[in-house]
Amino acid sequence: MGVVTTGPAAPGIRREHLHASVSDPVLDTMNFLNEVTMRFPDAISFAPGRPYDGFFDLDEVNAYLRRYLDHLAELGRSPEELRSAVFQYGPTAGSIREIIAESLHVDEGIVAEPESIVVTVGAQEAMVLALRALISSRDDVLLAPAPCYVGIIGAARLFDVRMATFAEGPDGLRCADVEAAVLEQRAAGRRVRLLYLVPDHSNPLGSTIDLATRHEVLELAERLDFHILEDSPYRLVSAGRQLPTLKSLDAARRVVHLGSFSKTLFPGARVGFAVADQTVVGADGRSGLLADELGKIKSMITVNTSSLSQAVVAGMLLASGGGAARRNGEAAKRYGNAMDATLRELEHRFPAQRRRAVGVEWNRPTGGFFLTVTVPFAADDRALERSARRHGVIWTPMSYFYPDGGGDTAMRLSVSYLSAAEIVDGVARLARFVDDELEG
Ligand SMILES: Cc1ncc(COP(=O)(O)O)c(C=O)c1O
């Protein structure tokens, strides 16, 4: 990693005087991946969880902005109000909450009052707000499956949130493991406040929680008194019928649902949201919504989500019947084809007998952007560097997604960003890399 030293030696700042999170390897993982990607620009990269570039059209941005402004004008807003809707600071909780509530209804069958929604700078900020609000003492615990999304691990590290994990095995999430982990924390005098889950086509595993387990985990949250952070950005970019969200099944309001438009619309908008419809009661007996509390925290972090970005996102939703699902049919098909092509090429390069002989295996997700390949050697940063340098192929070490260590011999492949030809070439390169490591 590049270290810049210029000018005469100044006393400088000692790293150990900074917050511990800046020395945490988790916060460096994305930098390392970016650095490898920049050093080997011709490599085929299965690393980024980005949507496919081919869906973006610069000319449409103006049209969507216009669509939203026309919508405001139809609601009777004056030209001055339209101007401020784009140029001014906006309400902390967001200016497009009604439109997002409608999209949740259209896309997901979730009935959410606009007041229960906070529009955030991506789902990432929504995670930060939820952790800040719901984790109130050193004995409060964030529980998550291992492996889990690096963004929640990093957010926990920023706030010194104690994190506990349970293993997610090849057959997916098991409620018995969740229950055992909650009880283990209790026995140690701590309290699991939040369970973080990506129920659909998770990042990094690509796994999906079945319907019976969704009901079971909601029942468990009620019985053992914790809340669930449901983060599901890959549903609408996956082909076929999706299972109901936890939020749509959440009669007891145990679920804080995190939304993201990064994969369904465009990540450059940096627009996401939280649905936090839980009642919060004060010592004085007065009550409000958890969303109000998240809004207070947001007011001291990002003040409000970009008004301009919200306007474009709202225009896109309005232009596609109020939801994001309709405009994602083609994308979902494309990503489904990319996943099929990757699985097919893996099968071609590692037929059953060969992969059993050498100890290579992978899972077969039904949607989303990611799958996992297990190999019989350390798939660490050094292996990644060799893979990029000698074979021109980049992937993500799975160990990045294990807060307590693990995943040392597995790699995450993302299929979303590559063309069909790149997938064929990329898997061939990966096979050559594996061969090389085995001969080692
Ligand atoms: C599981 C998961 N949650 C959240 C995010 C981040 O979403 P956003 O871009 O809305 O911050 C990602 C992005 O890759 C993700 O995979």
Image (cartoon, grey):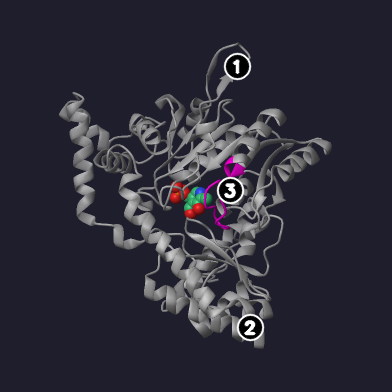
State which tag comes first along the sequence, 2 or 1.
1
Q: Is mark 1 within 8 Å of ligand 1?
A: no
Magenta span of residues: 196-211
Q: Is residue 117 visible?
A: yes
**Kind of residue at disc 3:** Ile
* Residue 16 x %, y %: 68, 56
- Do the residues bearing badges 2 and 1 touch, measured as CB atoms within 8 Å? no
Note whether 24 is above or below 280 in the view shown: below
Q: Against 380, is 141 above or below? A: above
Label 1 or label 3, whichever lies nearer to me, is 3
Residue position for label 1: 282
Residue position for label 2: 437
Name the mark on residue 152: 3
Mark 3 close to ligand 1, CB under 8 Å: yes
Helix, strand or loop under label 1? loop
Q: Name the quadrant of the N terminus.
A: bottom right
Name the spot of residue 230 as percent of width and height, x first: 55, 40
Image x and y of residue 205, in percent: 58, 58
Q: Quadrant of residue 70?
A: top left
Amino acid residing under circle 1:
Gly
Q: Of the residues under marks 2 and 3, which one precedes in the sequence?
A: 3
Q: CA distance from mark 1 to mark 3?
A: 28 Å
Q: Main secondary structure of the magenta part?
A: loop
Q: CA distance from mark 2 to mark 1?
A: 60 Å
Which of the 4 image quarters holds residue 10? bottom right
Closer to us: mark 2 or mark 1?
2
Decide if residue 64 is on the left or right side of residue 437: left
